[in-house]
Amino acid sequence: MAPLIKYASAHKLNYFIIHTNQHYSRNMDKVFFDELELPHPAYNLNVGSGLAGKQTGLMLERIETVLLKELPDIVLVEGDTNTVLAGALAASKLGIKTGHVEAGLRSYDRTMPEEINRIVTDHASDFLFCPTEKSRKIALGEGIPAEKLFVTGNTIVDSVFQHIELAKKKSGILEKLHLGKDGYFLLTAHRPSNVDTKDALHKLLSLLKNLYSEFKCPIIYPVHPRTKKNLEAFKLKLPDGVRLIEPVGFLDFLYLEKNAKLIITDSGGVQEEACILKIPCITIRENTERPETVDVGANMLVGLDMEKALLASKKMIAKERNWKNPFGDGSSAEKIMKIIEQHLR
């Protein structure tokens, strides 16, 4: 959302930020506001973690209270979190226009909570800002009227372009971890299907052991607090070559991505960032809501299959990084805000 917030500030638009605190540890929350030089939220709802129903219910109640007080012309939500779902539902039920940034994405895997959030948010929204023509066609195919759909690219491209030079200047993460360019693999794994059962987490660690044995390249893993807790609870030992580090801020993470030999992930956003930065990626999932990354040759799906992961890693590392970024030219925020201004006059 940073590029949209910066556009609104630069053009002196009357806006405010609601922060639910779905992420509440400093490394996954406040650090983003500080590093990206964003204004502090006007409302901090302190929802915290919890089961999806309780968390979403608290958000709905607290967001609704804010919206009734402020009565904005439009509410913008981005992505597929419980925060996004609650924001879209609260606004639409109050008759407030709703814009979904990053609309039309589908993994077609209903076991992913994010998939339900994406579908409901799209159908509750008045403006669907689709990153690509493919995502627009998906929304259109679900019966959403064409006049609600706009292909704008994705604001993550804006954010990567705006901050990569800043990351180069400010981040000391490579020095701190004693790493060099192309000298490590970067891992992100946090999805319940990969880390919330002993069997899945054991398979993931075996896959990592296999990759380290083959490439002798350290695997840097900024570990989610929940995953760290599960590793301890399941009494699973990290294989050689895997280095757990605390979650890092956006600039440090961007710089880790930019200099990695290979990215291994189950995150949708990281698949996009790897594609934009021209870093080869393998995705430890059976499906993706970013199929464009696979289509252009920037990413391969491997699940938790060791053989697939090994073959895909070899292929991705060996290939030329000459794919085209399908997610826009870095002007998505401007396109989105101009559409909104035009329609709300």
Image (cartoon, rainbow, N blue to C red):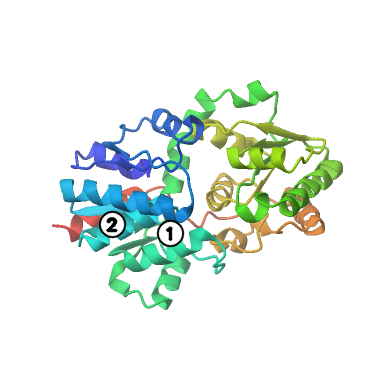
Task: Give the quarter of the image for residue 307.
Answer: bottom right
The type of residue carrying mark 1 is Pro
Q: Nearer the viewer, residue 139 or 312?
A: 139
The image shows residue 169 at horizontal and vertical percentages of 51, 24
Which residue is located at x 29 percent, y 68 percent?
Answer: 148
The image shows residue 93 at horizontal and vertical percentages of 25, 62
How many badges with numbers are in the image? 2
Task: Give the quarter of the image for residue 112.
Answer: bottom right
Q: In the shown orientation, is residue 193 left or right of residue 94?
A: right
Which residue sits furthest right? 213
Q: Nearer the viewer, residue 261 or 232?
A: 232
Is residue 88 at least partly visible in the picture? yes
Residue tagged 1: 131
- Element marked by disc 1: loop
Q: Nearer the viewer, residue 208 or 232?
A: 232
Q: Quadrant of the N terminus?
A: top left
Is there CB contact under 8 Å for labels 2 and 1? no
Which residue is located at x 60 percent, y 41 percent?
Answer: 226
Q: In the shown orientation, is residue 122 left or right of residue 260?
A: left
For residue 284, above or below residue 105: above
Which residue is located at x 41 percent, y 68 percent?
Answer: 136
Q: Earlier in the sequence, mark 2 or mark 1?
A: 2
